[in-house]
Amino acid sequence: MAPDGGSPGAQAPFGLDARPANPTCVAPPRPPDPAGATISRAFPELSFTQPLFALQAPGDSRRIYVVERGGRVRVFDKDATPPVSSVFVDISGQVNVEHDETGLLGMAFHPAFATNGQVFLSYVGNSAMGGLRSFIVRYRSPDGGATLDPASAEVVLEQDQPFSFHNGGHLAFGPDGFLYFAFGDGGGRVDPKQTAQNPELLLGKMLRLDVDSARPYAIPPTNPYATAGGRKEIYATGFRNPWRWSFDRSTGALWLGDVGEKLLEEINRVELGGNYGWSILEGTECARGSGCSTTGLTPPVAVYGRAEGVSVTGGYVYRGTAVPALAGKYIFGDFGSGRIWTLPGDALPGAAAAPQLLVTTALSISSFAELNDGELLVVDFAGGGLHRIHASLPPAPGGEAFPTLLSATGCADPTNPNLPSAGLIPYGVNAPLWSDGAGKERFIGVPDGAVMTVGPEGVLDAPPGTVTVKTFLLGGKRVETRLFMRHPDGIWAGYTYEWNEAGTDATLLETGKVKTVGAQTWTYPSRGECMQCHTAAAGFVLGLEVAQLNGDFTYPGGRVASQLRTLEHIGVLKLPAPVEQLPRMPAYAGPEPVETRARAYLHANCAVCHRPNGLGRGELDLRYSTPLAATKICGVAPEHGELGVAGAMLVAPGDPSKSVLSRRMHSLSTARMPPLASAVKDAEGTGLVDAWITSLPACPAGP
């Protein structure tokens, strides 16, 4: 690919006179996933606010209930045309939603709901002392499932939460008629108080309650500690943050997804009295370094690492009929990468089963939903929709295979892949993402006749068919080209091409890869890793936002012109206002105050994850547009460890050495931020952020 621009020249009205025709660099249909299944939006007329779960009542296959984190459950008739949702219950006044992992988290119908009308909700609210507390509450429906009466609330169980995360929160009735509920370990880095292994605490455990024999509950007599030795409610132990689990409706087997710390996500088959390892083990690895005893621990059925995802979402063994290829397979996904896999439904603990990729999505998978007929829905937290898993059509005869060489993608000159195809438009950003010192060439291809618009938070809304092209160079040598495509079905996906040593072409990688390039290690991201950064919360297209593009750019031939004016002039972009009225992000080096430049750096490098609904753990909001007082970093104690500094804060005004934000940027260990695909410290960026922290006399007053 050609460099971003030539030698700087005189200011020009526009960088390009006309829009280049782009017949070749257009996203093709997505390459087929291997398992014969796909997903599509179900009930497209309906959208929900941060949905976390969906389910049906026993014996009622007409209505679907959707749990929203904010404290509402909505219900709709799936057979209505069009379906219209109504409020089943609203307990938003009792629910705490000030933290990313709090809220209304779970719901279960009593097996005898048709006769007793009982429904159980799980949520995190506030304790009388001002802290956080988890609640399991029994309610009754007075009208056969049309509504739930908030006044009928009976608290079944409550538990104080030491942190705002790792709350677990899912609940369901087992084949034995008992109510099962799972708590996370309570939070903190590597379970600091080892609550998950302490039988005197409910945190980090699966509980089993008899909610019929007594109020608020009785203890099933076969629970491991029913008579002595620990909390009587415990069914199994050793969990970090169980996020969705289910019973196989055919065998009764209990499958559970447990979210990992830094290394591995795991799937467990949970049995009475089992100990599933946390925080001795994270998956199959010692959680606190080498040399841990695994005696008495039950291994997971399967694990996967950070190349595939960052936050497992447990699912169900498929017992439907619409997708015969999935019959009897356990289906689960990942909240961060949007990937969905299968495991054999008869796999046992210790089997080291290899998850098989089912489909790659752009969804934030908060849950799966098993309908009464055994079919599955996928719940999309960020997008607010429900999606159906169904059989995929076979590829059309003679259909073109996804290009394995960059020269065949239509996004490079086929005779010289070092050059872009004629239809690509070069661009640059004001505040670039650190990529271990690599130089970058950036281009975008928009289908002929299509126009980009400006969406929420100033992110460009690119039409289907759009391709962004980014090439990375080390020492002037091309190492990698990434194509990020919005396919015709509207789904974004990323593809990595590795350049050959001669620099004559690049080959598509099917998985991630790490290799030595010159004197440094270079990481080629997997497709799953691509989607850990290019999330719905971040707007998918990183860098393509008004504030980042609002500035001058040196176009081929040396013209210096406003990028936004140029894109608008050639008809590629429709702006909502004159350029002068649009936000602009400062460059890292420039006349702007150190705070604005440092905040721009954090926006580009950290806010991809650390923002509302992002993948960053905790409540940080590092977007440039967020006032410092609302970022929740200044003067705030870290919830994930002090990194060996007593009294450390996320940002300690005047002292980078006591600021976890700075220390993570300086680190090259597992504490490093960003954690993905970076092995070289950014001296300029860390220096800028440290200078800003040093300049802070105090934290601003709260919003």
Image: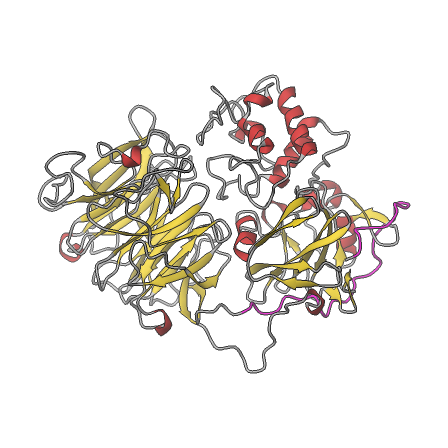
Which quadrant: the N terminus? bottom right
Q: Seen in the image, is 623 located left or right of residue 298?
A: right
Q: At 50% across and 43% down in the image, what residue appears?
A: 614
Magenta region, mostly helix, strand or loop?
Answer: loop
Q: Which residues are magenta?
A: 2-31
Horizontal and vertical percent position of residue 427: 75, 51
Residue at left 65%, top 63%?
Answer: 507
| Position above or below: 136 against 646 | below
Residue furthest out toward the bottom: 397
Q: Position of residue 630 (x, y in %)?
A: 53, 30
Q: Is residue 632 left or right of residue 94?
A: right
Along the viewing direction, whichever of 564 and 325 lies nearer the viewer = 325
Quick one: which residue is furthest to the right in this view? 10
Residue 343 x %, y %: 36, 61
Residue nearest the observer in this picture, 307 or 650: 307
Q: Is residue 23 magenta?
A: yes
* Residue 51 seen by the camera: no
The percent coordinates of residue 615 (x first, y second) are: 49, 44
